[in-house]
Image (tube, rainbow, N blue to C red):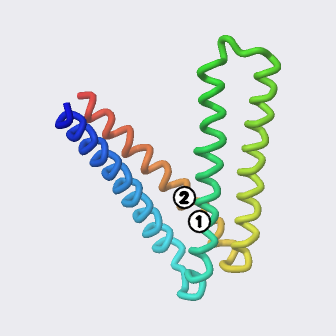
Amino acid sequence: MKKLLLIFLLFTSLNLMAQNNKRERIKALKVSLITEKLDLSEKEAQQFWPVYNAYEKETSKIRFEDIRSIRKEIRTNIETMSDDKADKLLNRLNKAEDSMHNLRMEFSNKLRSIIPSKKIILLKIVEEDFKKKMLHEYKKRKKEQGN
């Protein structure tokens, strides 16, 4: 029994490490793409990356801890949910989405003192393109696994 538990823990640890490695690789690809496409000067890069990383950390927190948990609660309870509970969840969801919007606006305003507006717009395009490429790759791999 101990061997079985040990093997289970080993595979679980390896799976978590692989997921973390994938996330780190994806993050590295994103950083590389942004660096290449924005063509940041050394001074711009020194100021840009701390602001960008703080923004990414905050948006991830809101997206994964707040919005995702609210949506999960909605999906699992929608059939039996009272209108009062739905109203409270909707208010929480709206508050989280407002926080995301405010964070985006604050981020954009901070960047204006670091890089030209054209590069800020380019950053938005690069991020959208990156998300599309990642989604395409995800769908492609799912399809390959299904066949």
Q: Which mark is residue 34?
A: none
**Which image quadrant for residue 28?**
bottom left
Give percent across and percent down for residue 14.
27, 48
Q: How many marks?
A: 2
Q: Is residue 12 left or right of residue 41?
A: left
The amino acid type found where label 2 is placed reads Glu
Q: Is residue 64 left or right of residue 88?
A: left
Q: Few, some or many C-alpha atoms within 10 Å of disc 2 (few <14, some 14-19, many ≥20)?
A: some
Q: Residue furthest top?
A: 80
| 123 vs 85, nearest the viewer | 85
**Which image quadrant for residue 139?**
top left
Q: Which mark is residue 127?
A: 2
Q: Is residue 138 left or right of residue 82?
A: left
Q: Residue furthest front?
A: 2
Quadrant in which the N terminus is drawn: top left
The vertical placement of 89 against 140, above or below, is: above
| 73 vs 125, nearest the viewer | 73
Please say if the residues under marks 2 and 1 sit with CB atoms less than 8 Å apart.
yes
Give percent across and percent down for residue 144.
26, 35
**Which image quadrant for residue 38?**
bottom right
**Residue behind mark 1:** 123
At 68% across and 11% down in the image, what residue appears?
80
Mark 2–mark 1 distance (CA, rounded to whole Å): 6 Å
The amino acid type found where label 1 is placed reads Leu
**Secondary structure beneath disc 1?**
helix
At 77% across and 30% down in the image, what residue appears?
90
**Secondary structure beneath disc 2?**
helix
Quadrant in which the C terminus is drawn: top left
| 48 vs 87, nearest the viewer | 87
